Amino acid sequence: MSVFAHNCPDIKFTVVDVNAKRIEAWNSRNINELPIYEPGLKEIVAEVRGRNLFFSTDIDRGIREADMIFISVNTPTKTYGKGKGMAADLKYIELCARQIAEVATDDKIIVEKSTIPVRTAQTIKSILESTGKLESSGNVESPDKKIKFQILSNPEFLAEGTAVRDLQNPDRVLIGGDHQTEEGREAIDILSAIYERWIPAERIIKTNIWSSELSKLAANAFLAQRVSSINAISAICEKTGADVEEVAHAIGADGRIGAKFLKASVGFGGSCFNKDLLNIIYMSYTLGLQEVANYWEGVLLINRYQRTRFAENIVSALFNTVADKKIAFLGWAYKKNTNDTRETAAMYVADYLIEETAKIVVYDPKVTQAQMHNDLELLGSRPSQENSNSLCAVNDPYEACHDSHAIAILTEWDEFKEYDWQKIYDSMKKPAYLFDGRNIVDGKKLSAIGFKVYQVGKGNI
Ligand code: UDX
């Protein structure tokens, strides 16, 4: 919404949320205290906040005053009941639709922004239509008419860390709606006109609502599949002496394949890939498409395998025991330039090593120790006190690495490339191991210093 407000100074945007603390943080006077770190974001918020972007907890008022409402509530994976661990939890979407129906006093366009299983728009529509109020005609002669809601699907394709840039200059914007009716087409055009203020019209794709919902899940599944494909190849590389970067370069040069999303890693993380794959798998399964479910599940399984393989490599290289050994983690976020840690590979690798009674010291430029403990607690492998005893965070990378038996790079933060690696080597226990889960350091140079270097998909130690 900040980017929208920046591009449409004459439209008022109000962000409402039940979480008063979050809203307070978005309103905080100190622009450095915004709850989300994203390059370029604070500059935009500083410009538009109080001008045409407002943050508030007054949800009813927000609903009443709006002509168009974007629903972007969380749709986490269900943790209970049918579909537990796989299906998307639509509880918040439903609550949101009910509140809109209860409060709205005139026609509105409702835009789904959250990622949802296909046909969720139907749920929203049914709730709004069966519980929505009558709009007073203001005239005793004519009857009050039912409030009309148009539902659009407008999935979000921005990636974290580049969110502002992605939204300023997207490859495409997708708007799904009710093509069949005039009101439906009109609603699509109204939303499209907002985007057209800064995005060329030919990049706006208009589809039926179900195609739009499915395209979002499919796009993430395809991207995740590429990462899992190259990660599967990385395991073969390590057994054969092929170099995964050379392979990625060679296959990516084929225009039909393309060079992007072919970086082997310790495994993908983030709020989308895992959740959306589970979503597709569960949806296929409930539609009776078991083979389709199995196909996409393979993408997830390779991701888990890649994380475990990385952690096992650390243990086996360190003479099959990491008990009471200090292991330094560089990075915790699921990728660089974000403080988001959802589904980060780092927590799974940490969990594995804590089980082996290692002592982990983490340095991440943007993630707090409290967040790391929180992540491990959510995994639920052991009492939280044990996690706190086994893992701590420090604010200095050199301190994290000092006296450690091994360093594991879990996030590709640029600053890691610039460190004084000789100084780090000198301060470590020998042999000094470096496990580069992102292939960002110069392996040859570090080997020359004396490090025993492991990189994903390369002829190793
Ligand atoms: C993704 C989609 O890219 C975006 O379009 C969608 O709206 C939300 O989900 P995001 O999760 O923010 O965005 O990050 P992305 O850059 O896609 O990376 C996801 C994960 O894959 C990260 O953990 C990243 O490190 C990893 N990755 C990505 C690789 O391991 N190798 C690659 O080549 C690319």
Image: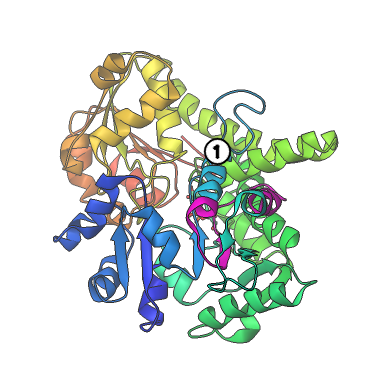
x%, y% of residue 22?
29, 49
Quarter of the image for residue 372 reads top left
The quarter of the rendered structure image containing the N terminus is: bottom left
**Three-letter amino acid code at the position of disc 1:** Lys
Residue 101 lies in the magenta stretch: yes
Query: As rendered, which of 262 and 202 lies closer to the eye?
Result: 202
Q: Position of residue 111 (x, y in %)?
A: 57, 63
Q: Find residue 238 and report its image quarter.
A: top right
* Secondary structure at numbered mark 1: helix
Which residue corresponds to the image point at 40% horizontal and 36% vertical from the top-left?
346
* Closest to the observer, 336 or 146: 146
The answer to whether residue 432 shows anywhere in this view is no
Residue 445 left/right relative to 457: left
Question: How dense is the environment of label 1, judged by Cα within 10 Å: few (below 14), some, or many (20 and up)?
Answer: few
In front of the other: 413 or 82: 82
From the viewer's perspective, is 242 left or right of 340? right
Picture coordinates of residue 358 (x, y %)?
A: 32, 19
Check disc 1 and report the residue beneath it.
Answer: 91
Tell me if I can see residue 60 in this picture.
yes
244 is higher (above) or lower (below) than 304: below
